[in-house]
Amino acid sequence: MKGTETLMAGFGGQGMLLAGKILAHAAMDSGLEVSWLPSYGPEMRGGTANVIVCISPSPVGSPLITNPRALLAMNQPSLDKFAPRVRPGGLIIINRTLIKTGTDRPDCDIIWVDSRKLAREAGNDRAANLVMLGAYVGYSRVVPAEAVEAAVEREFTGRKAKHIPTNIAAFRAGLGLGRAAVKAA
């Protein structure tokens, strides 16, 4: 596996930092080197939030990446800001729920995901972030799906443990969509 850099961005409270943390743990559990670099405004919810996750079979040189290989955009401001920075040949996953205007990047693979609908069908309206993560993992195969599911199980403990089944169901819904996109390409 070559190294990869993923930028996940949205409003605070949409769970992109959590999705990045889960991806980072799944990569570490798979024996890969990882960096996780969050960036967020002072607001708890509603401000901007993004995270860069670098995954490599060798040590990560720098956690700060200006041109990622992949972007998961949860809202229009994030897509508008970060899509131009994705490397040619990269991947852009767009949350159809909140983004109505796409991006003009014919040099990138683009996947539209109705994350809210899939999360709702999985039984957890708040798991749109895991739908997006699933689409990314399904398309990129950057880490095994089983490693992500194990990371979800470790992340949701105590009172949050009751959300494990619906979070994994949301991840699997996105995973199927990402795998289908590979076959269609």
Image (cartoon, rainbow, N blue to C red):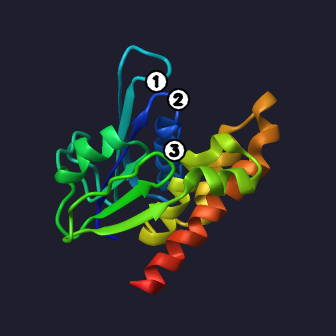
How crowded pointer 3 is (Cα within 10 Å; few <14, some 14-19, many 20+) is rated as many
Circle 1 residues within 10 Å: few <14, some 14–19, many ≥20: few
The image quarter in which residue 112 lies:
bottom left
Q: Residue at x 73, y 56 (%)?
A: 121
Pointer 1: what residue? 46
| Distance from Cα at disc 2 to Cα at disc 3 | 11 Å
Q: Could you tell me which quadrant the N terminus lies in?
A: bottom left
Q: Secondary structure at mark 2?
A: loop
Residue in the picture at 71% in, 50% down: 120
Q: Residues within 10 Å of mark 2 (few under 14, many from 20)?
A: some
Residue at the spot x=57%, y=66% of the render? 175
Q: Camera-side residue: 74 or 176? A: 74
Where residue 63 appears, as percent x and y from the top left, is: 26, 41
Q: SS at mark 1?
A: loop
Of residues 67 and 99, the one nearer the viewer is: 99
- Find disc 3 in the rendering and name its residue: 19
Seen in the picture, residue 91 relative to 18 is either above or below; the reply is below
Left-right relation of 52 to 131:
left
Quarter of the rendering occupied by the C terminus = bottom left
**Pointer 2 residue:** 13
Are the residues tagged 2 and 3 within 8 Å (C-beta)? no
Q: Label 3's element?
A: helix
Q: Are marks 3 and 1 in contact (CB under 8 Å)?
A: no
* Residue 28 location (% of width, % of height): 48, 51
Q: Is residue 142 left or right of residue 150?
A: left
Query: CA gap, disc 3 to disc 1?
Result: 17 Å
Q: Are marks 2 and 1 in contact (CB under 8 Å)?
A: yes
Q: Name the mark nearer the viewer: 3 or 1.
A: 1
**Tag 3 or tag 2, which sits nearer the N-term?**
2
In which image quadrant can residue 122 be found? bottom right
